[in-house]
Structures are given as structure tokens and as C-alpha cells.
Amino acid sequence: MVLSGCSWLTQSTSDFVVETSSSAASIPASAMETRHVSFRGVVEEAGISVYMEGTHRLKVSDGQFILLQSEEIDLDAYVGKTVEVFGAVRPTVEAGGSIMRVDQIAEVGVAVSSVSSTEPSTSSLALSSSSSIPPVVPPKSAPAPVPQTSKQPAQPPAPATTSSASAIRDELSLSEEQRRQLTVMAREDISAHRWTQQYCSSHISFCVPVHKNWWFKSFSAGTDALWYVEIGSAPIESIGTGPITVRLLSGSVESRKATDGQVRVQGELVVGFRSWTDNRHFEISAPKELEAAVRFMIQGLSVPNTPA
């Protein structure tokens, strides 16, 4: 599904990521675009409003919306339908608004309609933390298959005798693609200034730092976790692609025989633990070669800032 000062929509919604960037009032609109953003909502005609831009708008939740425009895609065909849109977002001329240049659109549960582009698609949702572009909220990004919309039911707490590492061992048996990405990620400079993105979910109300060269995708349902995110050095197309996993699980950290903020290396795995609300906790896990990255992510996992 990060909010830092103002809001791209009217308030907040689902998943998004923050990426730092410079700002200036004189920057042309194309330079202020934040690319590789996706939202899910219902398409509506723009109607009469204070905004001069956009032919349609996407209603996300609680009356919040983002303006839409596309020279290639017939947005009229999607009016009244629940869709996932993917493209580039920039501030509107009028203060406080945002507009997306739609590159891809998919009715939920239906194939993606896209504009041909040489730009790589991302599994992250980029959001500028600059004051010139307010925060935004998207769930997941195309061209990966549209995830289920239902929330994964809570799982019972794991028995205290269950090892966290053994619980995720099958999940972390590396495929050839994961090994390739691991090699790339293990060579990265992971100094603090390189972590210029965040993955955030306003549904769960958490943010976790993401390295500037890495990609991510949220699979909010469909696993044994209450929330599930994968991170890798390339676009995440499906579950089991990214070497790093972020999972929200039922039960306390103590039920995993761990402490809040602890990072353990167990065999070939490294697992970080963070306590959360309502008898839940996060586990960030990866091959042991990425121990330093897991430590940074566990320390940086936080509640997002929300606008006043």
C-alpha cells in the first residue's frame, strides 16, 4: 500500500515507497515526475473541480483521489471499474494535488493494458520525500500479476519451541534467480546514505528502508504471513524472487525465542525481529551474506509520519 509533511492524495491509503530527491519551484513538470508508481482504486470522470489538469481521477479510499491522464490509453473504458494504474506522478499546478501520467492499467483480475515503453517496470512505488511533492499511497505495481485484495487472515502464534529460522527455511531455499540477485546485492555499498527509499504500508502502518538500487513488491495476501514483502536487485515478478523477505506474523517476538531488534544468524540464514502491535511481530530474513542489510532494515523499521 510514508507520509512526510503533506499528502499526494488527500490523506493516505495503501502501500508506497519514499525516495529522496531535490526540489525547486522552477523545475519543469517532467523533471518533477516520480516514476514507477502504482495505485488501486475506482476510475471516475474528472468532473468539475478546482484542478485544471487530468481527464479522470482514481478514487482510492475515504474520498481520496489522484488525477489521471493518458494520451495512449482510453480511460473512459474503465470508468466505474476497480483498477490498478501504473505510471508517473507529479504535482498539479494547483497546490495540494497530484496527477498520474498513466502508462499501464489493469482492471482487477484482468490482464494489464499498457503503453509500450523502453523504461523498466518496477515493483516499488516511488514517492518523493521532497516538500515539493506531497506523499502518496499505492498498493502494488504492474507488470506483476495483480495481487489478491483480501487481507490474509491472522495465523495463530507459533509455538515457543519453533525456531524462526526453520519456519522460513523452505521459503529461503534459493532459486537460480535469487542466487544471481544475492551476488549483486552482497556487493552493494550499504552505507546509510544509500538507503534513499522506503517501502510503506498505511494499511499496516509501517515503513522499512530500501536500498536505492533495490526493488520490492508487496504480496499482501497469499502467504502464511499477515503481510509479506520481497526485496531484490531486480523487478519482483512473483513470490520467491527476492532474496530478502519482510513478514508480519502473529505472535510475540518472545514466542520466537528472540528479543525486540535482535538479528540472529542461523546456519545459512540471517533473521531480524521487531515487536509490533496487537500481538504481532516482524521478521526480516535473508541469506547470511546480507546480514548487514537486514540489521539496517530492522533498525529502520518504523511507523510512518502522518500529516497533521
Image: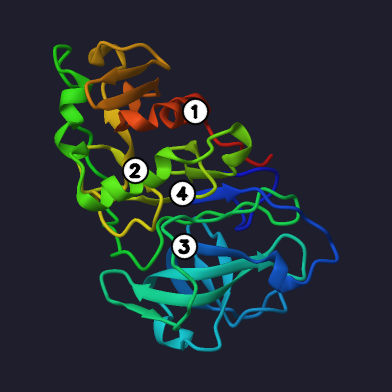
Give amino acid for label 3: Phe
Residue that badge 4 annotates: 214
Q: CA distance from mark 1 to mark 3?
A: 28 Å
| Mark 2 Cα-neighbour bin, 10 Å: few <14, some 14–19, many ≥20 | many
**Earlier-in-chain disc, 2 versus 1:** 2
Label 2 SS: helix
Q: Is residue 299 left or right of residue 129?
A: left
Q: Nearer the viewer, mark 3 or mark 2?
A: 2
Q: Nearer the viewer, mark 4 or mark 2?
A: 2
Q: Is residue 204 left or right of residue 175?
A: right
Give amino acid for label 1: Phe
Label 3 SS: strand
Write the residue at 26% across / 27% down. 269
Q: Quadrant of the C terminus?
A: top right
Residue that badge 2 annotates: 182
**Earlier-in-chain disc, 1 versus 4:** 4
Residue that badge 3 annotates: 39
Please determine whether, in this image, residue 226 is positioned above or below residue 81. Answer: above
Label 1 SS: helix
Q: Nearer the viewer, mark 2 or mark 1?
A: 2
Label 4 SS: loop
Please determine whether, in this image, residue 295 is positioned above or below residue 194. Answer: above
Give amino acid for label 4: Trp
Contact? badges 1 and 3 (CB < 8 Å)? no
Give amino acid for label 2: Leu
